[in-house]
Image: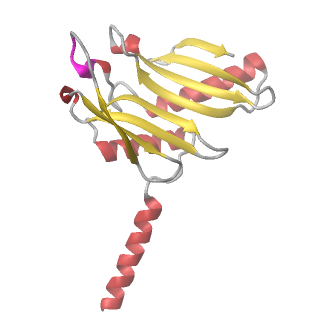
Amino acid sequence: MTKAVGYILLICGICSILSCGGKLEPNKTGFEKLQTELISKYGADAYYTDIQLTLTTESEVSALVTETKDPSSMKQEQWLRYGGGEWEKQADVIFSVQGAEAKSFMFQLNKEVSLSTMSDLLEKSKAQLAKEKQIKDPVFVSAVVSSKHQMNSKETGIFYYITLLDKASQKDYRFVYDLKGNAMSSLDE
């Protein structure tokens, strides 16, 4: 009986380790999985000022998030996850605003922001490169959703940023979209 309990605990431990996060992928499934993971880790009511996905090696994507569960505390935490690893706290961030509530400069997942939308914008950016620059297979560099430090409203102050690389020319192409997914600028070289 004790041996059986030991095996069960070992199997549960291995499953727990293997299910921690998993590899981040720059596609719709990967972005949706990350959003689910963030909501699970920080809660559905967490507030963010930025979520960044960055290619760190040829096949590893890392995530950096700045979040708080209590915007009125004016304190945030910054967390980093390399590839399929664990979340590691990077910094405590003090948020300073004048004349407004801190949450006016923050966003929530499944409310103002969706990582699924960010994935759609990534595909839109790739399609634009293919059409306008004949770049068929650009490399994902980064995808970011972030709030500006100065803004009048969330609609005009939260942006999605997509960066893609053309391997042949080694040029980066940057795309900026507003909260509704409208292009603000693109094909920045």
Q: Residue at x 74, y 16 (%)?
A: 132
Q: In the image, 27: left or right of 189? A: left
Quadrant of the frame with the N terminus: bottom left
User: Residue 13 is drawn in which quadrant?
Assistant: bottom left
What is the magenta range?
Answer: 100-104
User: Residue 47 is drawn in which quadrant?
Assistant: top left
Q: In the image, 182: left or right of 104? A: right
Q: Residue at x 65, y 14 (%)?
A: 188
Instruction: Decide: is 115 above or below 40.
Output: above
Measuring from the top left, give residue 72's x and y in whole percent. 18, 26
Measuring from the top left, give residue 161's x and y in whole percent. 53, 23
User: Residue 90 is drawn in which quadrant?
Assistant: top left
Quadrant of the frame with the C terminus: top right
Q: Residue furthest top?
A: 152
Name the one closer to the observer, 89 or 142. Answer: 89
Q: In the image, 179: left or right of 139? A: left
Measuring from the top left, give residue 15's x and y in whole percent. 43, 67
